[in-house]
Each structure stands twice: as C-alpha cells, then as structure tokens.
Image (cartoon, rainbow, N blue to C red):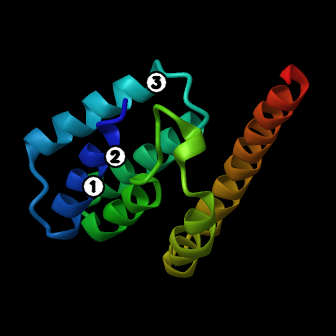
Amino acid sequence: MGDKMIEFAFIRNKLASDSFNKEDGIMLKMVKDKILISDSPFKEITLNAINNCEEFIRTDQLILAAREIHLIHNFTFNNFTKWNADYFYKIELLSYLEQTEDVSKIKKLILLLAKLQITIDNQDLLKIFKN
C-alpha cells in the first residue's frame, strides 16, 4: 500500500490543474478499492476523503476535490508509525479547516480523527504491555 501516497499526490495534482480525466477516475477507484480491504488505521479518514472527493468531482468542483485528497496524500498506509502526525495536525489539517466551508464535513473529520487517535494510542499501549 506504500504506493498510495504517490497515487494520491498524482490524483491531487491532476484535480488541482483541472486535467483530471476518466483514466484518473479509474485510478482513484482502484485506490479506493485497495483501501476498502485494508486494515490501515487511516482507512476511515481516507474513505471519507475519497467519498467527498468523488462528490466534488461529480459536481465539477475539482479544486475542492483536490483539497480532500491533499488532506490524506501523506498518510503512510504500510507503517503508520512513520506518519508525521505533527506535520499533519499543524499544517495539513489547519489548511483544510481554514478552506472548508461545509461544517458537516469538518465535524465528521474531527470524529474520524478522534477515532484514529484512539487507535494509535491503543497500539502504543499494547507495545508498552508487550515489553
């Protein structure tokens, strides 16, 4: 799943440059299908972002679609411990929140981030108890 970062960055760039096409849509669906069967802690947030992205694509709001993918493009699906959470929370999340006008999307994201943090905290606790 490590190549997802590259694919997400590619899709984001195509959306942001208004050059997203049918083949890119197929790539997005293929990535989504891989995420659906994964056990990544980022799964729910990623699927939420992809679903939002697809909604914006259907209404030809490609910049908003790109913003959804930008939020998740640096997730490390193979090894979440390599994820730079500090950068995500200080830079990427704040940028997303500042630019997103749909409060329902923000509320859902906050809920999913809370669930992600609980998952990460629980995995950290398991490591402590194993030692």
Marks 3 and 1, the one that precedes in the sequence: 1
| Residue that mark 2 sits on | 5
Mark 2 crowdedness (10 Å alpha carbons): few <14, some 14-19, many ≥20: some
Nearer the observer, 21 or 122 = 122
Q: Label 2 sits on what residue type?
A: Met
Q: In the image, what residue occupies the spot 26% across and 47% down?
A: 6
Mark 3 in CB contact with mark 1 (< 8 angstroms): no
Q: Is residue 56 left or right of residue 40?
A: left
Mark 1 crowd level (few <14, some 14–19, many ≥20, 10 Å Cα): some
Marks 1 and 2, how far apart at CA: 6 Å
Examine the rendered structure and indicate whether residue 41 appears above or below residue 130.
below
Relative to 41, say whether 34 is above or below: above
Q: Nearer the viewer, mark 3 or mark 1?
A: 1
Quadrant containing the N terminus is top left
Indicate left or right for 77 with 125 as reference: left
**Which residue was labeled with disc 3?**
36
What x and y, as percent, mark residue 117? 75, 47
Q: Specify the label residue 9 is tagged with.
A: 1
In-front residue for pair 43/106: 43
Number of numbered tags placed on the structure image: 3
The residue lying at 82 percent from left, 34 percent from top is 122
Q: Which amino acid does the dot numbered 1 rest on?
A: Ala
- The amino acid type of the residue labelled 3 equals Leu
Q: Is residue 124 above or below residue 69?
A: above
